[in-house]
């Protein structure tokens, strides 16, 4: 994929980050204050949510409303929102992939648009590597490791309740669909790669398996799974893919230098792609690209920007 050769289309129709500005979704553009790296973003009603670095390995969640008021929640490392921006869930947990060391314990938070008082929370003092995966109906899905071995378990939690529920049908989850019906289960991870299965959450039935790609998400209708290489190591991923969830067959594959893939709707994916300056610290050109799963055509959803951070929201 050569981003310079693509035509420019409409802007992404989901929340996304351009520089330090959260755009898209329902609501006006909002700038995230500070200078720390922004890890992920989303929207809760018209407010912007952002997980940002505050030190070498410390993080926090910023909630910024349209007037510029900011609320901070310490140690948050993961964030999910509902597609209609009516609710958000996030988890405070120390993760080793952010440069520090893992630490025991975590907290899952949940809040809905317009709610008064503090967000609902679930303290998990014995858990490791807590990460939220989806907010479905009244349930938050998250994964956690009980003994620091890397063997994730999937849990569901109804905000306000004191205990979560173990979802026994899905082992080592990497993604849960927005409707909670389908999940990706990582069956194997070693120095050469990984294998993932697409699983029916209710029954545990395995639809398909791939050892070529790591699944990170699903289209709203769950017909298509998206992801990247089974083993990622380096500045960017050289391939992004869309798979048939039920068969594992490759629907579309894109080659280039990519930082992220996400889903816009049932027929379109968005990809953060790098053009010139790959691997360099300056003069790096990036754009968000929209690709049609039916026609395989792609277009730029943003202009080509130089040394500007781009990110797809939850």
Image (cartoon, rainbow, N blue to C red):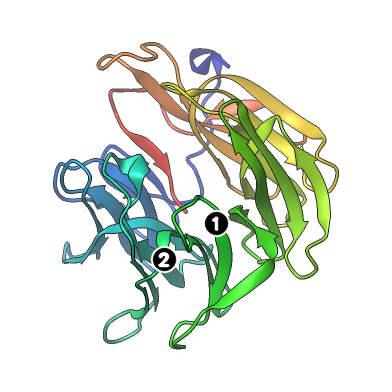
Q: Mark 2 highlights which residue?
A: 127
What is the residue that sits farthest to the right in this orientation? 247
Seen at 18% across and 40% down, the residue is: 56
Q: Is residue 156 left or right of residue 30?
A: right
180 vs 152, nearest the viewer: 152
Q: Mark 1 highlights which residue?
A: 152
Q: Is residue 310 left or right of residue 301?
A: left
Seen at 58% across and 47% down, the residue is: 264
Task: Determine crowd level at label 2: few under 14, some 14-19, many 20+ residues with C-alpha closer than 10 A.
Answer: some
Residue 296 visible: no
* Disc number for residue 80: none
Verify CB contact (< 8 Å) between mark 2 and mark 1: no
Which label's residue is closer to the chain start, 2 or 1? 2
Q: Which SS class for mark 1?
A: loop
Instruction: Give me the C-alpha separation between circle 2 and circle 1.
Output: 10 Å
The percent position of residue 58, horizontal first and vertical second, equals 21, 50
286 vs 23, nearest the viewer: 286
Q: Is residue 53 left or right of residue 178?
A: left
227 vs 252, nearest the viewer: 227
The percent position of residue 109, horizontal first and vertical second, equals 37, 72
The answer to whether 240 is drawn above or below residue 150 in the figure is above
């Amino acid at each position: 994929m050569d981003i310079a050769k693509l035509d420019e289309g409409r802007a992404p129709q989901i929340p996304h980050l351009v520089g330090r500005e959260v755009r898209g979704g329902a609501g006006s553009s909002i700038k995230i204050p500070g200078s720390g790296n922004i890890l992920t973003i989303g929207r809760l009603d018209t407010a912007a949510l952002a997980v940002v670095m505050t030190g070498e390995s410390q993080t926090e969640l910023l909630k910024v409303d349209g007037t510029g008021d900011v609320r901070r929640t310490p140690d948050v490392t993961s964030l999910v929102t509902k597609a209609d921006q009516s609710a958000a869930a996030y988890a405070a947990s120390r993760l080793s992939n952010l440069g520090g060391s893992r630490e025991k314990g975590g907290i899952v938070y949940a809040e809905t648009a317009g709610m008064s008082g503090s967000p609902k929370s679930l303290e998990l003092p014995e858990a490791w590597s807590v990460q939220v995966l989806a907010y479905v109906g009244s349930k938050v899905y998250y994964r956690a490791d009980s003994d620091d071995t890397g063997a994730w378990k999937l849990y569901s939690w109804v905000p306000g309740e004191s205990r979560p529920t173990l979802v026994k049908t899905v082992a080592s989850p990497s993604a849960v669909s927005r409707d909670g019906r389908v999940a990706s289960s990582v069956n194997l991870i070693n120095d050469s790669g990984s294998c993932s299965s697409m699983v029916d959450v209710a029954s545990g039935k395995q639809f398909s398996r791939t050892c070529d790609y790591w699944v990170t998400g699903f289209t709203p209708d769950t017909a298509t799974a998206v992801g990247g290489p089974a083993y990622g190591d380096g500045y960017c991923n050289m391939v992004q893919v869309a798979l048939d969830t039920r068969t594992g067959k490759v629907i579309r594959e894109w080659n280039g230098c990519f930082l992220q893939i996400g889903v816009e709707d049932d027929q379109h994916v968005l990809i953060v792609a790098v053009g010139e300056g790959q691997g360099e610290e300056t003069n790096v050109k990036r754009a968000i690209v929209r690709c049609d799963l039916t026609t395989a055509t792609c277009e730029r959803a943003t202009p080509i920007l130089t040394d500007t951070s781009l990110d797809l929201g939850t």
